[in-house]
Image (cartoon, grey):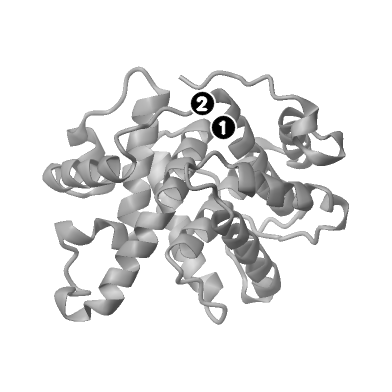
Amino acid sequence: MIQPSSASASDLVASTSPQDLFKKAKASAESKQTLVNSLVCSTSILLSTLWADFDTSSASDSLNALNTFIISSLRRSRSSNLTLQVALYYLVRLSNHIKACILKKFHNKHLYNAKSKTKANVLLCKKRTFLTCLILASKFVQDKNYSMKSWSIISGLPVKELVHNETVVLNHLSFNLYVKGEVFTEWSSIISYFIMMFSKSNSTSTLIKPQQQTSLNKINSQWKLIIDNLDPTFKLSKSINYFNLLVSNLQNLESAPIFIESY
């Protein structure tokens, strides 16, 4: 299980500790609904960023489709915010493998059929990879969890495929699902930054609108910078250095009015 970390305030600039930052994020979110909305929207943009398919011309449409999928997965599996954050941690750890898989597909287009998702290209599908990370995070966070048969009912995918996907992702994660307390604290700080961005708006819209394109582009760019600054061993040190620069400018943030329905 994830244990609380006692990281000092000196770990972040401007005397802002990860714990204080998360408290500010929760305070800026007027309700649990807003917190959930922010997490889900951040997740959809992160997925698009990782798979390098963030289309600046039609981001709202693709993100709305992802939001629907994420909400459905979380609602049906009754996953907590903690489980979602751990799943996102696994996703970012997979970033280099995802890039390599996409490049391999680009150079070997004749080997892939876009109409049929084969076992060999699970990392090419952001939804399947997200679902697999959610399953693994659920198993890590909770002592008791669903069987693969239950996950099959939840996701609509056959048990055999779920087991294969899990094995592939576990292999890329070196079969290491453990999350150190201090690492999770740093990761929560990064997530909290995006929560604060989203929760600044009082909008009650359940869909991402094209007018929000500027905010979407900004968030996509910041996710990309965080991912590109990852330490090779994923200790988050380089990302935290970049993240510190973001924290120091929190007062100048532009809000991103993106909200979706509760799950």
Question: Would you say residue 258 is visible in this rendering?
Answer: yes
Q: Element at badge 2? A: loop
Mark number, residue 183? 1
Q: x, y percentage for residue 56? A: 57, 78
Mark number, residue 65? none
Quadrant containing the N terminus in the rendered view: top left
Q: Amino acid at mark 2?
A: Lys
The residue at 55%/82% (across/down) is: 57
Q: How many marks?
A: 2
Mark number, residue 180? 2
Quadrant assignment, res 213? bottom right
Q: Amino acid at mark 1?
A: Val
Q: Mark 2 and mark 1 in contact? Answer it, CB < 8 Å.
A: yes
- Asked if 262 appears above or below 1 in the picture, the reply is below
Q: x, y percentage for residue 22? A: 71, 34
- Asked if 222 appears above or below 135 in the picture, the reply is below
- Asked if 48 appears above or below 8 in the picture, the reply is below
Q: Element at badge 1? A: helix
Q: x, y percentage for residue 227? A: 55, 55
- Depth check: give the residue in front, 11 or 84: 11
